[in-house]
Image (tube, rainbow, N blue to C red):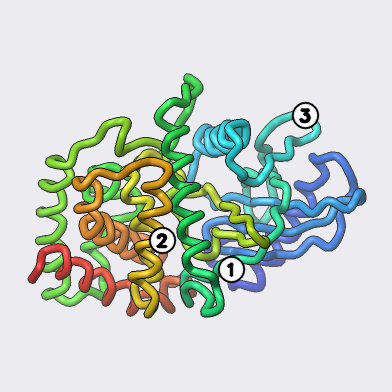
Amino acid sequence: MTEFNTLNHDQQVAHLHDLARHALQHWDGDFADIELVKFRENAVFSAWRHDGQRVALRIHRNGYHCEAALRSELLWMEALESAGITVPQIIRAQDQRHLIEVSHADIGERHVDMLAWLPGATAGTSEAGVQADTEIDFLFAEAGAIAARIHLHSAHWQQPDEFVRHAWDEEGLIGANPFWGRFWELEQLSDEQRDLLQQARRQARQDLRQYGRHLGNFGMIHADLVPENLLIEGPCLRLIDFDDAGFGWHMFELATALYFCLDDPRYEQIKTALIEGYHAVKPLTEADRQTLALFLLLRGTTYLGWIHTRQGTQTAIEMAPMLIERACGLARDYLQV
């Protein structure tokens, strides 16, 4: 078997198409118009079932999440849906499994699941930010309110015994081996930048411990409230892509929603709408609000870890300069240097 990562982009996509067509046989119905719509961590395909329903077929990245963690993500999404929070509906396979495993001669084994396609248009992209014509107050007030409802649900939800997800906690963010990688080892960093980030890392550890963690500020979070995961349809906002969901601080969630808006001239308006939308559902303390600079820094360093562990990918190559500059700027703001 050829190593998947050694194939060029077109070869990878062709093999993923083959695997998608094979995987669809595990679900009821005939499917057509199979189209790749996103290929980053996972490969997400759009397909139309014979009864007119559009679905999203996700082929999960090999080695990112274990089977138990993937199943836990889907169980949590079902729990959120039962609580009245609009998330993509999980479509179980013919044997009622949430998740199947499919083998391909040139790809190996991959886990695959299916979700109902949610209508709406994305609010923007991580690369370009929020679209210029977006109604900012509506979008971010709703995003804040949805995040707050998720966090309130998380505080009271009884997790299944075998629930497994990663943690955006102290170790997962700034420990010896952060979840997304040792960001301070990124080759593109200058010595000055590396020293700055290490100084911020040391201070962040102290501040996280002082802030503490409890049911009021820490629990299951979506962890990827970026513009491309916010779907707008008329007066409704819907949230997609729970792949990064795990245990983390609630303020880290809000920092994630703000991170790709930092250069937007409407940033202060965006921040106000997000914070007040959240506060109206789940009140924030002054201590919570004062951690925003801390969690913006930590969100920035996670993205450096991401590109460090994905060197050579097109996304990492294109975004590295911006992510480095932004992380260092956030570190200076946080340290006030």
How packed is label 2: few (under 14 Cα within 10 Å), some, or many (20 or more)?
many
Cβ–Cβ below 8 Å for labels 3 and 2? no
**Which percent across, then down, holds residue 20?**
74, 54
Q: What residue sits right under mark 3 in the picture?
A: 95
Position of 69 compared to 274: left or right? Answer: right
Between the C-alphas of marks 1 and 3, the distance is: 33 Å
Q: What residue sits right under mark 2 in the picture?
A: 273
Mark 3 or 2, nearer chain start:
3
Cβ–Cβ below 8 Å for labels 1 and 3? no
Cβ–Cβ below 8 Å for labels 1 and 2? no
Q: Secondary structure at mark 2?
A: helix
Q: Is residue 277 visible?
A: yes
Give the residue displayed 66% in from the left and 37% down from the top.
99
Q: What residue sits right under mark 1 in the picture?
A: 7
Looking at numbered disc 3 in the image, what kind of residue is underneath it? Asp
Nearest to viewer (mark 1 / mark 3): 3
Please determine whether, in this image, residue 264 is positioned above or below residue 90: below
Q: Secondary structure at mark 3?
A: loop
